[in-house]
Image: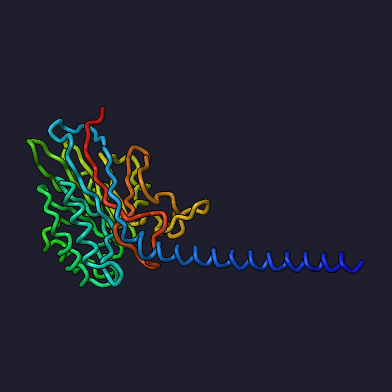
Amino acid sequence: MEKPAESANEQATERNISRRRFLKWAALGLGTAAVAGAGYSTLVEPWWIKINKYDIPIPDLPPALEGLRIVHLSDLHVGAVVSKSFIEDCARDAAALNPDLVCITGDFVTRHAHFAKPCCEALSVMKPPLGTFAVPGNHDNWAGGAAVMGTIRDAGIKVLINDVAVVETRGAALAVAGLDDLWTGCPRIDRVAAKLPAGVPNILMMHNPDLIEEFGEYRFGFVMAGHMHGGQVQIPLIGTLIVPSKLGAKYAAGFYEVGVNRLYVHKGVGLISPPVRFGTRPEIALFVLKQRT
């Protein structure tokens, strides 16, 4: 009668050993996955730039401007984490897309104004024939807005703060407009709308996409923004984790139809603290203008 007891004890011991082995391997697997995930989100994805190309219908676009190419960059954040060399590599990739003009929707630097110069030096490899245009971001203003914007202007980038510029090519004109930052400036939608020349198609730049909710009936041909970094971290079944907005992830990234306006929110090139990206790669956006049919 003792052997069955011994057999039962042996089976229980084997089950306990198997359970311990399972837990050990499971813990090891989870630890490995965590390390791999941490490595990917800090060493791979933040520097794995993605090029996204979109056709953009513009109201009243003249046939001569069909196919005009616009590169949109945002949130470069040159500083202690994002290097000049990384931005230069991105700028070379952007230049290879042969844009007619480049639009940068703010946050050139993080923390210090002296990072504006290396940022602009990195961007200088782009030489779009119609120029490079920019608006300020909240980090630019926090770092010393006048100094940052002065350096950007000195580099030949046209800064538009509640202002409009008109570019001409192929015998046709396009208005490029820019608004001040929502958090750290004084955006004047009415002033910009009043400056738009009648009968000329337009595009609008701004940094913070939340501003779109203040447009009301003001209508622009196409609106570009940044600021959100795509959330920087997107966890499946959980969603966006890093959202610098009182509206949450409402305008995290991509296209939105808001009232009479169409908005694109850029995922950003650089990043802020914590210096990780997961599920939202940095991007270069290429817009090809099309006639609206």
Confirm whether residue 146 shows in the render.
Answer: no
Q: Point out residue 198 in the picture as x, y percentages from the top left corner.
A: 17, 36
Question: What residue occupies the far right of the structure in this picture?
Answer: 1
Q: Point out residue 17 in the picture as x, y percentages from the top left corner.
A: 69, 68
Q: In this view, does 64 lie to the left or right of 57?
A: left
Q: Which residue is drawn at 27% across and 41% down?
A: 222
Q: Is residue 187 above or below residue 67?
A: below
Question: What residue occupies the far top of the structure in this picture?
Answer: 293
- Dividing the image into 4 quarters, which one contains the C terminus? top left
Q: Residue at x 20, y 53 (%)?
A: 93
Q: Is residue 53 left or right of residue 157?
A: right
Confirm whether residue 114 shows in the render.
Answer: yes
Q: Residue at x 22, y 47 (%)?
A: 192
- Dividing the image into 4 quarters, which one contains the N terminus? bottom right
Q: In this view, does 134 lie above or below 290?
A: below
Q: In which quarter of the image is residue 202?
A: top left
Q: In this view, does 30 lie to the left or right of 57?
A: right
Q: Point out residue 172 in the picture as x, y percentages from the top left corner.
A: 10, 36
Q: Point out residue 42 in the picture as x, y percentages from the top left corner.
A: 38, 65
